[in-house]
Image: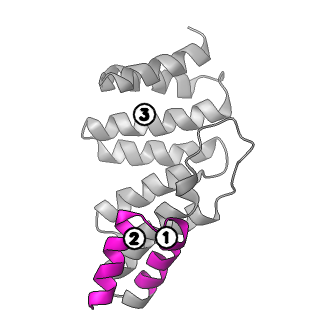
Amino acid sequence: MEARHQYYYGRELYYHGQYEEAVSVLERFLLSAEGWVENKIEACSVCAGCYLRLGQEQASLNTLLRSMSFDLPRAELCCEIGKFFLEHGNCRNAIYWYETALNAPKRECSEGFILPDCHDYVPFLQLCVCYDKLGDRQKAKEYNEKAGACKPYSQSYLYNKRYFDSL
């Protein structure tokens, strides 16, 4: 099967909940010398999602980290790595990855998949959560305000604003 077809087939398997088969197809694609870099990076993201749904959290994290063997870190994947650490109670590591997402180069001209919110709004909001959990309310509030500057009517920002105003 041609590399590009293998990649898209793996994605379709994922979208249809066939995670084990998707992992098999996507792992073969990732090991292949063929394939476009952007597809390889997206395949890491999709494959990580499969591992997560299969209850293999460490394999999911390893696959997200593997994406950086193909090119510079993508903000989208940095947010996913940050989420992993935040969900596992490791706020310091989560902060590192959310800050890395903020500093990741924007690829407006890229033909890859881009989630613009992962360059500002999402990391700001998650940094707010991390710093609040660490007890640094001032820094948490500052990050919430930065998230609010991106999306002033978002429910998350407004909820956090009410929370900080009540303290």
> Relative to the observer, which residue lies in front, 133 or 2?
133
- Residue at 75% x, 43% y: name it: 109
Which mark, by number, is residue 157?
2
The correct choice, above or below, for 154 with respect to 132 in the image is: above
The Cα–Cα distance between marks 2 and 1, rounded to whole angstroms, is 7 Å
> Relative to the observer, which residue lies in front, 54 or 136?
136
The Cα–Cα distance between marks 1 and 3, rounded to whole angstroms, is 29 Å
Q: As drawn, is 156 to the left or to the right of 26? A: left
Crowd band around label 3 with a 10 angstrom C-alpha radius: few (<14), some (14–19), many (20+): many
- Asked whether the viewer can see residue 97, the reply is no
Query: Where's the C terminus, which quadrant?
Result: bottom left
Crowd band around label 2 with a 10 angstrom C-alpha radius: few (<14), some (14–19), many (20+): many
Residue with the mark numbered 1: 147
Nearer-N-terminus badge (3/2): 3
User: What range of the chain is rendered magenta?
Assistant: 139-167
Farthest front residue in view: 153
